[in-house]
Amino acid sequence: MSAETTAVIRGRVYGTVQLRHTGRGTPAARFTVMQVSREYDRARGQWHDGEPVPVICTVTGPLARHVAECLTNAVHVIVTGNVSLRDNLLHLDSAQVGIDLAHHVAYIDDTLPDVLAGRAPAPASRATSVPDTAHRAAPVRPTSAPAAPAADWWQSPPRGSWDAVTEPSRTAR
């Protein structure tokens, strides 16, 4: 174990994820991550992309199924694992794989709204749920202090203004 080198690779998935099963039925996935370093050119005074380095990543067990379901070509990922050099190629036996949130938005089962996850029926359309007198109501004016976010921000009504950008709201998406 002392000869293992742990590395963190950050890059884009290149190609498709291959999912197979071992003789005992354990899922195993293999995919390639293209890591492109950013280099500073002192002569020009500019940053540019360096040479792309392909890293072949493998995962086993439940993580392999998750990787095969979630990752597609060109998705930015961060992968951690033990790196080795075989046949002049970098191989990473991955322990952790994650979506790079600097480039993507990711939902997990617990944060996915019930309607999108199929756990609740779709809400009634806005036309049937709004009373007839709604068009005569006075416009909503923002208060001086933003209201505290609702416990379930997805169900909270949209804000009337863009003043408090940091407050969770459906209109801020």
Image (spheres, rainbow, N blue to C red):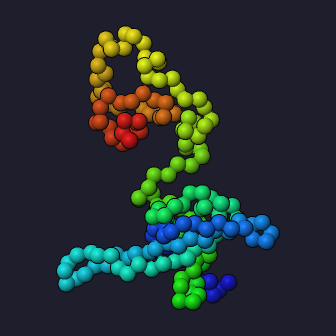
Total labels drawn: 0
The residue under the point 62% across, 58% down is 66
**Residue toward you, 80 or 52:** 52
Question: Which residue: 33% across, 41% down?
Answer: 165
Q: Is residue 19 above or below residue 145?
A: below
Horizontal side, residue 12 vs residue 146: left or right:
right
Q: Nearer the viewer, residue 30 or 3?
A: 30
The quadrant the N terminus occupies is bottom right
Q: Residue at x 60, y 31 (%)?
A: 120
Q: Position of residue 105 (x, y in %)?
A: 45, 52
Judge whether residue 47 can be spotted in this image: yes
Of 166 and 119, the residue lying toward us = 119
Q: Look at the picture and state if 119 lies above or below 66.
A: above
- Residue 141 occupies quadrant: top left
Q: Is residue 8 visible?
A: no
x, y percentage for residue 94?
60, 72
For image coordinates 41% across by 59% down, the residue present is: 102
Q: Is residue 70 above or below residue 95?
A: above
Work out which residue is located at the far left of the displayed protein and give it.
44
| Image height of 69 relative to 94, above or below | above
Residue placed farthest to the bottom in the image?
87
Q: Position of residue 9 (x, y in %)?
A: 49, 73
Rendered image quadrant of residue 145: top left
Give the quadrant of the C terminus: top left
Q: Residue 164: horizontal and vertical position, in percent? A: 32, 37
Q: Is residue 14 left or right of residue 59?
A: left
Q: Quadrant of residue 85?
A: bottom right
